């Protein structure tokens, strides 16, 4: 499956080869695909699974749009991690559990950044919400890529052994 995904993505890379490094293109393809999956799942969960109804838990009631967000995240979190680990940043030599923990921290930070940027752009700068979402996505995607490359899936340098 990994080989098929790599061949598929790399086939479409040729027109962009002069503009982007292969790893960046793979990141955009995998991240974009996972984002589309997230939006699709959110739509299905919100409209059909939850039928736009509140979710009543023993000690908490959750609005349907927030419940759908977490339901979709339950699927796109592992798919995003696996795509990043095996397709985009496969050269990383960190242990899988370390990568998973760091990926979880990154996703948490991205959720927080989305919230903060949207609040700032819409409520402080009075930028239209759709434009704010586009700006927010640009900043969060850049942060996510750099964090995954330099932290979550970094390649540890092998220390040279003394003779």
Image (cartoon, rainbow, N blue to C red):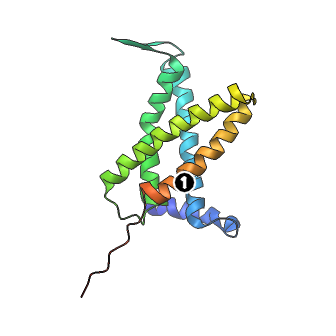
Quarter-of-image position of residue 14: bottom right
Q: Locate residue 65 relative to residue 56 in the image: left or right.
A: right
Q: x, y percentage for residue 104?
A: 40, 43
Asked whether residue 76 is in view, the answer is no
Quarter-of-image position of residue 92: bottom left
Of the 4 image quadrants, the one containing the C terminus is bottom left
Looking at the image, which residue is at 73% across and 30% down? 125
Q: x, y percentage for residue 50?
A: 49, 18
Q: Crowding near pointer 1: few (<14 within 10 Å), some, many (20+)?
A: some
| Secondary element type, mark 1 | helix
**Residue extending farthest left:** 163
Q: In this view, does 148 lie above or below 40?
A: below
Q: Mark 1 points at which residue?
A: 145
Looking at the image, which residue is at 54% across and 30% down? 42
Asked whether residue 157 is in view, the answer is yes
**Residue extending farthest bottom:** 163
Is 136 in front, or is 160?
160
Q: Is residue 113 above or below residue 16?
A: above
């Amino acid at each position: 499956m990994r080989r098929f995904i790599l061949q598929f993505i790399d086939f479409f890379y040729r027109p962009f080869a002069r503009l982007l490094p292969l790893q960046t293109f793979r990141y955009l393809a995998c991240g974009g695909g996972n984002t589309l999956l997230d939006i699709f799942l959110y739509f299905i969960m919100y409209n059909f699974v939850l039928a736009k109804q509140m979710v009543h838990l023993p000690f908490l009631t959750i609005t349907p749009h927030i419940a759908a967000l977490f339901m979709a995240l339950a699927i796109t979190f592992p798919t995003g991690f696996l795509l990043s680990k095996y397709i985009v940043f496969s050269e990383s030599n960190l242990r899988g559990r370390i990568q998973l923990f760091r990926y979880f921290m990154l996703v948490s930070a991205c959720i927080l950044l989305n919230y903060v940027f949207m609040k700032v752009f819409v409520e402080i700068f009075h930028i239209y919400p759709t434009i704010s979402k586009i700006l927010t996505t640009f900043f969060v995607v850049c942060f996510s890529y750099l964090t995954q490359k330099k932290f979550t899936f970094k390649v540890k340098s092998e220390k040279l052994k003394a003779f």
